[in-house]
Image (cartoon, grey):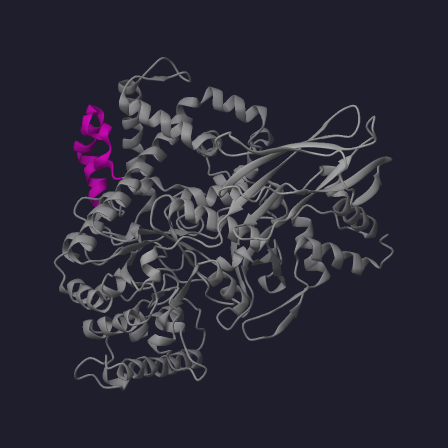
Amino acid sequence: MYDLPEAELLNLLSDRAGVAADYHDIAGVRHVTTDDTRRAILSAMGFRVSDRSALIEELTAWDQRPWERGCDPVCVVRAGQAPREWPLHVRCEASEDGQLYVHWMAIDERGEKHGERNEGPSLPIHEERVIQGRRSVRLMLPLPLDLPIGYYDVKIWVRGGSTPIEFQFRLIMAPARCYAPESFHTGARTWGFALQLYSLRSERNWGVGDFGDLSKFVEWAGTQLGAGVIGLNPLHALKNTRPYHISPYSPSSRLYLNELYIDIDQVAEAKTTPDVQSRLADPAFRAQLTQARTSDYVDYEAVAALKRTVLDLCYRTFVHDNFEGVEPDLKPTTARGWFFHSYVQQEGEPLAEYALFQALEEERQLVQSSAVVWADWPEAYREPASDAVAEFKRRHMKRVRFFQYVQWLAAEQLIAVGTQAGQAGMPLGLYQDLALGGDRYGADGWRFQRVLAHQADCGAPPDAFAPEGQNWGLSPSDPVKLRASGYQFFIELLRNNLRYGGAIRIDHVMALFRLFWIPRGMPASKGTYVYYPADDLLAILALESTRARTLVIGEDLGTVPDWVRDRLAAVGVLSYRVLYFERNGDGSMKSPSAYPSQALGVVTTHDLPTLSGYWEGTDIETRVSLGLCPTEEARQHALAERHVDKARLLAALSSEGLLPNGMSADPAQSPVMTTELMVALHLYLARTPAWVVLANVEDVLGQRAQINVPGTVDQHPNWSRKLTATIEQMMQDSRFASLAAQLRSARPPV
């Protein structure tokens, strides 16, 4: 059957697994995937590709898999799709009357049955094969397409002999589009602020912005300034250790929250526990707290240690006051105890496994006196479903429950801020950010190791910014295994992140279609794209977005083909438009009318220069100091290009009548970013038809230093720099009031 040369067999298997044969970079240059890259990526997916015999075995197994498994593990159907049938592969012996009989039903998430029916005896057979010496047939069953949107377990019993055969697959009924408030379709537009939560200063926080600070910011921005949305950095759980574990885009888990954001003042037990009050009054403790609060940079380790110390004390009081019995069989005795118990029950196994990982990691660090990653744990602990892990959980349930308690506190506080945003009149409220991936040695890497390709990294192909490509050090999900699992990981990711706000930004949204894989140990330039089941993933995104009533924004910057943006737009995902990049073919800035309406507009992002830094060339000098702009010639070239781009921005403002009074169109006459120019640039964006426009808090404050410099780890204080003003000072800052007044005027609520 596969009497082909080895190279062609490798190409066949690569094509079936979604490995691209070639790709075009942002400059249109074609890159052909090498055989070495194909083999390495297929190996990372678990295929055996060492020689011709192995390739034939894998291709044969691929062909036979539907026949051996009975049916595909998941079927995704979009609202409005034409009626379809579902293939069923049955190993059978003829029954007494020589016919096949099928009984099946769909069971929804509440356990209710739908569409129960019988088929047969005269079922048409579409194909027949002999698999391992036994007769197998392929039947086509009609799907029940009148079901409400949601997830269903379809159970099937086939009788073609003495013993019935049982099959099951997941049926996902999805809407045609993601959720969007109806007001946007009738002309409403909104605006808001984007901020890095960790960077917020206040007179009361513990050295990192927290949910108490966010609450205060939301109340001020919503009720006094009229903002409709607050955009946030990813709030995912981090290990909170420098230099590798503080980036919100490389978390330990994307399903749960960073405990550093918990406002200790809001924790009920902190107010009633004598040990906590004693600790807070201790001069040494207060000195550490003051040092963390007054530092210009977030000291992640120090803040984590301070908060963990107090949370440990709070938990002891929580258990004592709200439960009876002995670990692990505690019984809640108060309303607060029952609220926690209900949360744990509702979160189920995902939270239990996350908390278990946290307890295991903590224990292994104590035992081995160092930060040992889970891949180096004793082998019995590396597999979440092992007996050893189950025994560890039984013996350490008290500590596992502590980490569940911490997540409960974080979730309750963030939900409360979301509620407050609605009460402040914000049509969208909180805007969450979902990172592309996580640390392979974090909680998600341990929990989902069977669907993640840990022997590959993801990144970006070579471009002008990074001639050798980019390696982000994140393990990609395996599209074949992801589908075989019924997309459970993807569903959990969406569900856990969509529940906290009215909008979500999906980082590197192109990953729903294709992702640039780099075999571990190879340079990024040797990578290639791997394709994903985009139709299925977009349908699930639409389903979860509709259920959560959450607007979806896709970060579609970089090497993104037009067809990807077209398909995203068709399912209601907003495009992410950055002022710096929105150019015409001649390099001039696009006019506001040229922006799409189904979009979010920003001046800049966390990976780009701040507005003041851009205007004054601070980012160029930073790159020079870091060795990323290696020659004086390169520096002068970058400064010359920046002068041209600034002139284009001023020309764009002038064409819209927005150039501030007295300002020349010559950028040399305006070397410093002013409040008036900052407001004018945001007003330019506000005139676009984009549904949402955001202003970065750093830009309003005139900060020059960049939040994150891509390509650096510890050479630059990435993800650590605090704002130059406290919330209390910002509330008295006329720059915020001036900008808000202009944006309210340009984007009045409908």
Is residue 248 found left or right of 66 in the rendered image? Answer: left
Q: Position of residue 215 (x, y in %)?
A: 22, 46
Q: Indicate yes or no whether the magenta region holds residue 747.
A: no
In this figure, what is the number of numbered marks? 0
Q: Which residues are magenta?
A: 263-291
Q: Quadrant of residue 376?
A: top right
User: Of all residues shown, which one is farthest toward the top?
Assistant: 325
Looking at the rendered image, the quarter that the C terminus falls into is bottom left
Quarter-of-image position of residue 304: top left
Residue 148: image location, x then y, percent:
49, 42
Above or below — where is 737 with respect to 133? below
Q: Any magenta on residue 268? A: yes
Taking the image as drawn, is residue 719 in sight?
yes
Residue shown at 42% from the left, 32% from the top: 347
Q: Nearer the viewer, residue 331 or 741?
A: 741
Residue 307 image point, x, y percent: 29, 36
Q: Is residue 384 left or right of residue 671?
A: right
The residue closer to the viewer here, 427 or 733, is 427
Is residue 736 toward the left or the right of residue 613 in the image? left
Residue sitting at x 15%, y 63%? 737
Q: Position of residue 709 (x, y in %)?
A: 40, 62
662 or 690: nearer the viewer: 690
Q: Is residue 241 visible?
A: no
Question: Above or below — where is 17 with respect to 321?
Answer: below
Secondary structure mainly formed by the magenta segment: helix
State left or right for residue 247 relative to residue 99: left
Q: Residue at x 56, y 48 (%)?
A: 77
Q: Which residue is painted at 57% across and 58% down in the image?
A: 514
